[in-house]
């Protein structure tokens, strides 16, 4: 099948032209750790990646911690033999502490992580390397200096951070420019609208947002029954967002997304993703796919332009 034209945008000052939707590889890390998504079939993961690339998506975002290396290995498998590979973004600073996540921003640890990620992914350089979490807070300068070293050596092409606040971004900017930021952003996680997104836009920092569908909550497929039947090793089962009192409010929001989706002949998930892309600070949205059949309906978000009427409906202002 021929590639479709997905809208592209320049990612901050990196010079990378990225599609407005990227493939998120968190869920394909599967289970076996505290932020796992339950059982996952690697063949389906590879097929999902190939389907997204076939439809024109040109970047994948993963992390060493997703399945403690499993996600990166699967991405590496999917990239084998491709005549033209997508941009590969990954993250460091979270380690395996016996199934629990341990944070480490020490230089030597990050260098070991970079080398291991390069090997698992099967690439000669990581296109964008990101500090996953600013923890421990007192080590972010050391961690960022290590990232600048990796970039100077050519092991990584661009460097960015995830989950940093404005004060932390300011602290590390004097060491090396922050090229990109990856915050959580969706209709159920809007905190970054206040300070972080305006700061990134003003500073020319590229922004790719994660969980634009609220980790599956806004897809339209997440019912009370489905949440109840999630496997115990799916982290969402313990999340406040998927429980009362928040759940009723979120399901009402999904109902409004479904109304707009029906009028626009698309899916609630696509509407939720398109909503995040309307923010002028946002360059791209990371969307997680676990099976190839999930790809096409959500990629519709790439060309979906929401009207003022749609926005009023989504935000509950139309009544």
Image (cartoon, helix red, strand yellow):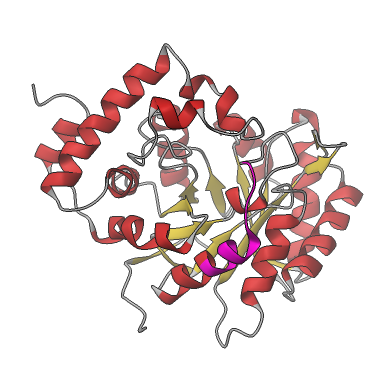
Q: Is residue 305 left or right of residue 118?
A: left
Q: Is residue 316 left or right of residue 11?
A: left
Specify whether residue 45 is painted magenta. yes
Residue 12 visible (yes or no): no
Q: Is residue 213 left or right of residue 291?
A: left
Q: Residue furthest top?
A: 245
Specify whether residue 127 is painted magenta. no
Residue 48 drawn at (x, y percent) = 51, 64
Image quadrant assignment for residue 106:
top right
Give the total of numbered labels. 0
Q: As displayed, is residue 299 above or below residue 271?
A: below
Residue at horizontal 36%, vertical 80%? 3
Q: Is residue 246 left or right of residue 89?
A: left
* Picture quarter with the C terminus: top left
The range drawn in magenta is: 38-47
In this view of the protein, which residue sits in the foreground, 223 or 59?
A: 223
Q: As displayed, is residue 300 above or below residue 247?
A: below
């Amino acid at each position: 099948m021929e590639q479709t034209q997905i809208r592209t945008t320049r990612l901050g000052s990196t010079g990378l032209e990225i599609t407005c939707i990227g493939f998120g590889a968190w869920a394909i890390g599967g289970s076996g750790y505290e932020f796992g998504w339950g059982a996952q079939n690697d063949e389906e993961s590879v097929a999902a990646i190939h389907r997204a690339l076939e439809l024109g998506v040109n970047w994948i975002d993963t992390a060493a911690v997703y399945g403690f290396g499993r996600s990166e290995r699967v991405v590496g498998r999917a990239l084998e033999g491709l005549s033209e590979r997508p941009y590969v973004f990954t993250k460091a600073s979270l380690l395996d502490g016996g199934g629990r996540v341990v944070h480490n921003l020490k230089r030597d640890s990050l260098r070991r992580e970079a080398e291991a990620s390069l090997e698992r992914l099967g690439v000669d350089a990581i296109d964008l390397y990101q500090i996953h979490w600013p923890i421990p807070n007192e080590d972010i300068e050391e961690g960022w200096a290590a990232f600048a070293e990796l970039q100077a050596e050519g092991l990584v092409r661009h460097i960015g951070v995830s989950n940093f606040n404005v004060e932390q971004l300011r602290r590390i900017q004097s060491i090396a420019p922050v090229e990109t930021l990856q915050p959580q952003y969706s209709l159920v996680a809007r905190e970054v609208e206040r300070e972080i997104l305006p700061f990134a836009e003003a500073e020319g920092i590229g922004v790719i947002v994660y969980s634009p569908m609220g980790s599956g909550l806004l897809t339209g497929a997440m019912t009370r029954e489905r949440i109840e039947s999630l496997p115990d090793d799916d982290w969402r089962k313990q999340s406040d967002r998927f429980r009362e009192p928040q759940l009723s409010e979120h399901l009402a929001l999904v109902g409004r997304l479904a109304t707009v989706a029906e009028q626009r002949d698309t899916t609630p998930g696509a509407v939720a993703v398109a909503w995040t892309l309307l923010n002028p600070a946002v360059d791209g949205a990371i969307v997680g796919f676990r099976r190839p059949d999930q790809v096409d309906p959500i990629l519709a978000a790439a060309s979906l332009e929401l009207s003022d009427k749609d926005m009023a409906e989504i935000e509950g202002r139309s009544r």
